Amino acid sequence: MVGSFAAAEAFLGAQGRLLERLRWAVAFRGAPNTQVAALLRAYQNADGGLGYALEPDLQCAASQPLFCEVGLEIAHELGWRDDAWLQGICDFLSGVADADGLVGPILGSALSEPRAGHWTEPWPAGLNPTASICGGLHALAMSHPWLTRASSACVDRLLAEPPTDAHGLLCCARLAEHLPDRALGERLRDRIGAALPEASFFKARAGADGYGLAPWVFAPRPDAFMASVFGSAVVADPMASHLAALAAGQGADGGWTPAWEPPGSASRAAWSGVLTLQAVRTLVAYGAMPVAGSE
C-alpha cells in the first residue's frame, strides 16, 4: 500500500497543533524555519527548561527533561541554533541532574498534571533521556560543563551495559550519531546494533501487533547513521516491509494515530499530528511516498 501525501497534509491541517503544521511547511513546502523557531522559544520557561506539553503525553507547563529532548530534536531538524535558548536548557538540566550529570524524563512537578498512564512516577536518572539530550546538544555544536560530564557518563554506561529496551537504545543512538569523536560514535553504534535484537519494544518483524519501535524509527532516512545495522541478524524483515507496514497504518482520515492511550482528546490529536509528520517524512525520504503538489 502506498500512503496518500495529500490526505496526510489535509489531516494535519485539520487536526495537528500549530507546531506540526509549521514543521510540515518547512519540510515539504519550502517555508522558512523562523516561525517554528519562535514557537520553540515560547516553550522555554524562566528556569531555562522547556515546558507546556511539548511532548503531548505530559500536559504540564513546568520544565521537564523530556520536553528538552523533544525541543532539541526539532531544533536539529530545522537546522536552527540559538545560543541563549541552548544555554538555558543546559543550565536547567545541570540544576536537576544527579552527581554524574544524568537526568530522568520527568520531575515530580509533572505528577499533579494530566498525563498518560505510563507516567506514574518520576523515572530514575539514566541513559533515557540523557543520552538523547546530549546527542541533540552535540548536533547543535553546543558546549557546556554539564554536557561534557553527562556525555562522558552516558558513554561509560553504554559501553559497560547497553539498555535492554528499544527506547533507551534509541537515546544512545542519538548520542552516538552526534558525538564529536566519530570513531567512538561508530563503536557505540555497533554496541547498539548488537543489543537491538533482544531489546524489549523493538519491532524486528514488520506489522507486528502491539506497541514498539520499528527499524525506521532508528533510521528515518536511507543514509541515516543507524541504517547500516539493520541486516538480517537484527531484523526479521527487510526495511521495505517495515515501510509498507508504516504506510498501511495511515487511517481513512489521512492520519496516523498513537498505539497507546494519551491523557485526553487534545493530547491524542497532538500525537496524531506528530506521528503523521514522522510517518510522511520517513516514507518520502525512502521514496515510498511522492510529495503531492511539488511539481
Image (tube, rainbow, N blue to C red):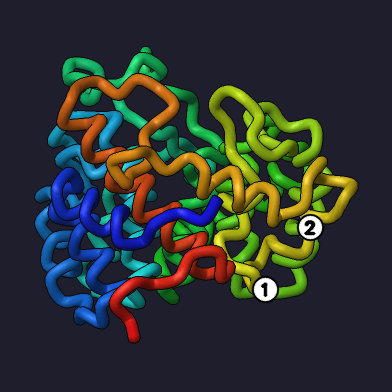
Query: Is disc 1 placed on a helix, strand or loop?
Result: loop
Crowding at mark 2 (Cα within 10 Å: few <14, some 14-19, many 20+): many
Q: Tag 2 or tag 1, which sits nearer the N-term?
A: 1
Q: Is residue 68 visible?
A: yes
Q: Residue at x 63, y 29 (%)?
A: 201
Amino acid type at mark 1: Asp
The residue drawn where x is 31% and y is 54% is 8
Q: Amino acid at mark 2?
A: Val
Q: Secondary structure at mark 2?
A: helix
Give me the residue at 13% from left, 71% from top.
35
Q: Is residue 193 left or right of residue 255?
A: right
Instruction: Please determine whether, in this image, residue 290 is positioned above or below residue 270.
Output: below
Task: Quadrant for residue 41, please give it.
Answer: bottom left
Observer-nearest residue: 216 or 133? 216
Looking at the image, residue 86 sits to the left or right of residue 246; the answer is: left
Q: Is there any visible trace of residue 138 in the rendered image?
A: no
Which residue is tagged 2?
229
Number of the label disc, if any, that sits on residue 25 = none
Pointer 1 residue: 181
Say which of 147 and 256 sits in front: 256
Vertical placement of 20 versus 96: above or below? below
40 or 157: nearer the viewer: 40
Estimate the x, y position of residue 199 in percent, counting from the top left: 73, 32
CA gap, disc 1 to disc 2? Answer: 19 Å
CB atoms of marks 1 and 2 within 8 Å? no
Residue 57: x percent and y percent? 29, 30
The residue lying furthest to the bottom in this view is 295
